[in-house]
Image (cartoon, rainbow, N blue to C red):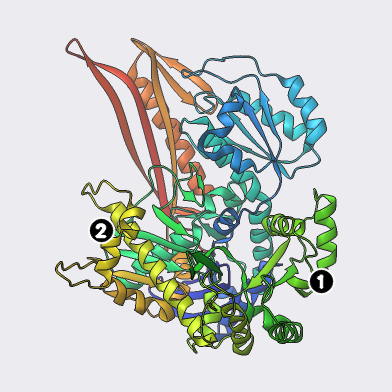
Amino acid sequence: MTLSLGVDTGGTYTDAVLVRDETTVIASAKSLTTRHDLAEGIGRAVEAVLDQADIDPNEVSLASLSTTLATNALIEGQGERVALVLIGFGEKDLERHGLSDAMAGDPVLFLEGGHDHSGGQAKPLDEDRLRGWLAEVGQDVSGFAVAGQFATRNPAHEQKASDIIRETTGKAISASHHLSAKLNGPKRAITAVLNARLVGIISRLITRAQTRLGELGVHAPLMVVRGDGALISAEMALERPIETILSGPAASIVGARWMTGQSDALVSDIGGTTTDIALLRDGRPAIDPNGARVGPFRTMVEAVAMRTTGLGGDSQVHMKAQGLGSMVALGPKRIVPISLIAMDAPKIVHDTLTRQMRAAAVDELHGQFVRAVKGSATTGLDTREATLLERIGEGVQPLDMILRNRVEHSVLRRLIGRGLVQLSGVTPSDASHVLDLNDAWDRDAAKMALDLFRRQISGAGQVLAASPTVMAQMIIDCLTHETGVALLESAFAEETDDFILPPIDLARHVLTQKGLQGHAGLVRINTGLNLPVIGLGASAPTYYPAVGTLLSCQMEVPEFAGVANAIGAVVGRVTIRHSGTVTSPSNGQYRVHLETGPEAFIDSDKALQRLEDELRMRATKDADSAGAEGVQVTVQRDIRTANIEGNDVFIEADITVEASGRPRIAA
């Protein structure tokens, strides 16, 4: 008998499951995610499943972790301060693909050097300028990203720059050619920057998780779910944390297939921060050919084709003006529900809400609280940021007692963006408590907060809702509608018919929306989904039946929907893919682009075989390092030719080698 332990750390809950012989869930448990130290929540969830199953921790032969931590950090604009070295690029390249937005004001160095399309050196690397710049910024950042022009054709300058940075600063380095074999330097640079931002976040998670599991007596090897649903070793995840974006959603798809047996369905996973939607077709999730997109950023990370939207049980509720009226809007930011923060500080929350309800008018800061995140790095703060963080101090504080002027609003947003402060306010989770759909946290605090929120005045001079209960139903209705729109958008995006309009415009089009309402005037319009939806997430049983009704589709919420991510974490496979390119700089000349630099051949077959052998060796070695056993290797060649005067002429070839196997288990 084999026992596998799956753990998933989400924005709100940390889940754990025990699976016997990869066929049966024998225990499952949830614990609140402890943002200040994720290992605490992991430990509580793992302790609970071990107690349920009544087993010795030493019997666990495999432990695996999926997480939304990286995804949430990027969506919420969090991450550590990093520096970017761009080799062979100009300042205009910083604006491509949103690279300037990704840097968010962090230092950038434009350095002479780089290579051309065939891997030849374009200009020598300016090593002296790099060393001088490192002396200025090296101590002000947590790590570095390095991206060179055509580095996937010749990584020599990226490697040399990385060596200099390592020798000078000792900081972590993310080189773009390690993360993708594709061209498009600015896009590779974004991937490297985001990887560098996540190194510290993911490192703390994995290191603390390993320590806590060891303290509980679980000594099995720890695996981590990658964004394509495959498993890798914890050590590999520490080197490439960017590959864990969409880890949690990818695990949920694997878990959905395992639990339901559905081959063709939309999988919709609602968490505290996001809703993640993917198409399951022929029993497999598709890989996004353009690279994973999270929030505003398109990366070069191989991941499931997933649409992620900032819509979750803990999405911030806003009042949105609409002419003389007003409406409820959700997200995209995640905040701590009032009903939850009241569990940590009941007196301050209840006393504050009572005081604010007695006020003559509702202030925009009423019903909101802040608290500092324990143990966060505070390097690089300016004077205003440091002053405000000190004022917040320890514990939960009413926001109207913390902010003293309009300038401090933007200061607070920066602290939240750095992950140093958490904001608490009204969320759908609070609404579900008021409607008795949920009873996990403090219902009374939620009701008072919604009573404050509904008193806001619209453009017509009317309050937003007549009572907290009406306000709560408006919020839940908004969540149902927006979830339906997200599912329709995902379905339209997969349609092969040419609808001309973009998927999001089709989903929100007046005819689509009238069809959802069953419009039957002179024209009859019906809209719905023509395939099942698998609803996942702890709150799926609460919210998703109404979504199924809205979309007139089969809605399947499996028994263990709330721990699907944790299940998917232990029923997947270890899969490593490596790709490479052979180019032809001139007729009869072939160039193989390798990590060690380009190699020249005069025979195309020998060039292709050289690349395949190298990729096969690397993939097999990395699969072994990633914790795989029984490795099987597949090879895919994409050879592009052109017919010139009746002859097929070699243009370029890409080879992808995939090594896959089951994770090794402890003896």
Residue beneath the point at 25% across and 52% down: 495
Q: Position of residue 70 (x, y in %)?
A: 58, 56
Callout 1 touching callout 2 (CB < 8 Å): no
Which is more N-terminal, label 2 or label 1? 2
Instruction: Mark yes or no: residue 264 visible.
Output: no
Which amino acid does the dot numbered 1 rest on?
Glu
Residue 23 picture quarter: bottom left
SS assignment at label 1: loop
Image position of 59 with respect to 667: above or below: below
Q: Nearer the viewer, mark 1 or mark 2?
A: 1
Describe residue 280's horizontal placement relative to residue 15 as left or right: left
Which amino acid does the dot numbered 2 rest on?
Asp
Labels in figure, total: 2
Residue beneath the point at 58% across and 46% down: 240
Describe residue 368's horizontal placement relative to residue 137 as left or right: left
Image position of 588 with respect to 510: above or below: above
Q: Nearer the viewer, residue 105 or 251?
A: 105
Q: Position of residue 578 (x, y in %)?
A: 45, 39
Quarter of the figure that contains the N terminus: bottom left
Q: Nearer the viewer, residue 310 or 477?
A: 477
Q: Nearer the viewer, residue 79 or 17?
A: 79
Instruction: Mark yes or no: residue 536 visible.
Output: yes
SS assignment at label 2: loop
On the image, numbered disc 1 is attached to which residue?
394
Q: Position of residue 577 (x, y in %)?
A: 43, 43
On the image, numbered disc 2 is attached to which residue?
282
Quick one: label 2, few (<14), some, or many (20+) residues within 10 Å? few
Describe residue 661's horizontal placement relative to residue 359 as left or right: left
Quick one: label 1, few (<14), some, or many (20+) residues within 10 Å? few
